[in-house]
Image (cartoon, rainbow, N blue to C red):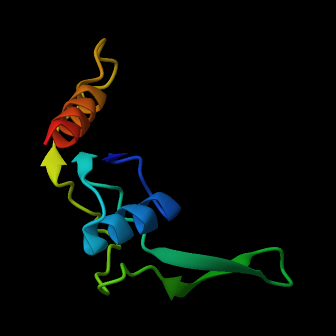
């Protein structure tokens, strides 16, 4: 079970994509951010810089996540500042159901 949301980016999305592609777990929450590129800044002599995309993140099944994100298997929308964490509660419920099978 992996909790994801719009704040899940970069390495978290690589992990989420690997888990989803491999069928190794269940993603619970909302779509991830969609940060699927690596950018390198090259300083210039005049003090400015050049930002160049030097790599792309792909899931093991070669899905490009950039600006798309990764959709969870179980979508649960958590309102900001909510008193109860319904995403966590849903994930715990799913784990308990899986254990009981």
**Res 50 visible:** yes
Quadrant where the C terminus sits is top left
Up the image or down, 72 lies above or below 11; here it is above
Q: Position of residue 84 (x, y in %)?
A: 28, 15
**In the rendered image, which quarter is residue 64 located in?**
bottom left
Q: Which residue is drawn at 16% across and 55% down?
A: 73
Q: Where is residue 25 in the image (x, y as percent from the top left)?
A: 29, 57
Up the image or down, 40 lies above or below 5; here it is below
Q: Position of residue 28 (x, y in %)?
A: 24, 45
Looking at the image, which is closer to me, 9 or 94? 94
Residue sitting at the far top = 83
Looking at the image, which is closer to me, 8 or 23? 23
Up the image or down, 27 lies above or below 79; here it is below
Q: Which residue is drawn at 29% across and 85% down?
A: 61
Q: Residue at x 20, y 59 (%)?
A: 71
**In the rendered image, which quarter is residue 100 located in?**
top left
Q: Where is residue 52 in the image (x, y as percent from the top left)?
A: 59, 84
Up the image or down, 22 lies above or below 9; here it is below
Looking at the image, which is closer to me, 55 or 4? 4
Q: Which residue is drawn at 46% across and 58% down?
A: 12
Relative to residue 80, is residue 50 drawn left or right? Answer: right
**Res 68 visible:** no
């Amino acid at each position: 079970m992996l909790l994801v949301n719009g704040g899940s980016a970069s390495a978290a999305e690589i992990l989420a994509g690997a888990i989803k592609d491999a069928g190794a777990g269940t993603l619970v929450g909302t779509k991830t951010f969609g940060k699927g590129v690596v950018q390198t800044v090259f300083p210039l002599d005049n003090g400015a810089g050049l930002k160049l995309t030097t790599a792309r993140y792909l899931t093991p099944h070669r899905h490009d996540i950039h600006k798309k994100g990764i959709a969870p298997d179980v979508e649960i929308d958590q309102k900001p500042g909510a008193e109860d964490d319904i995403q966590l509660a849903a994930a715990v419920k799913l784990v308990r159901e899986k254990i009981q099978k």
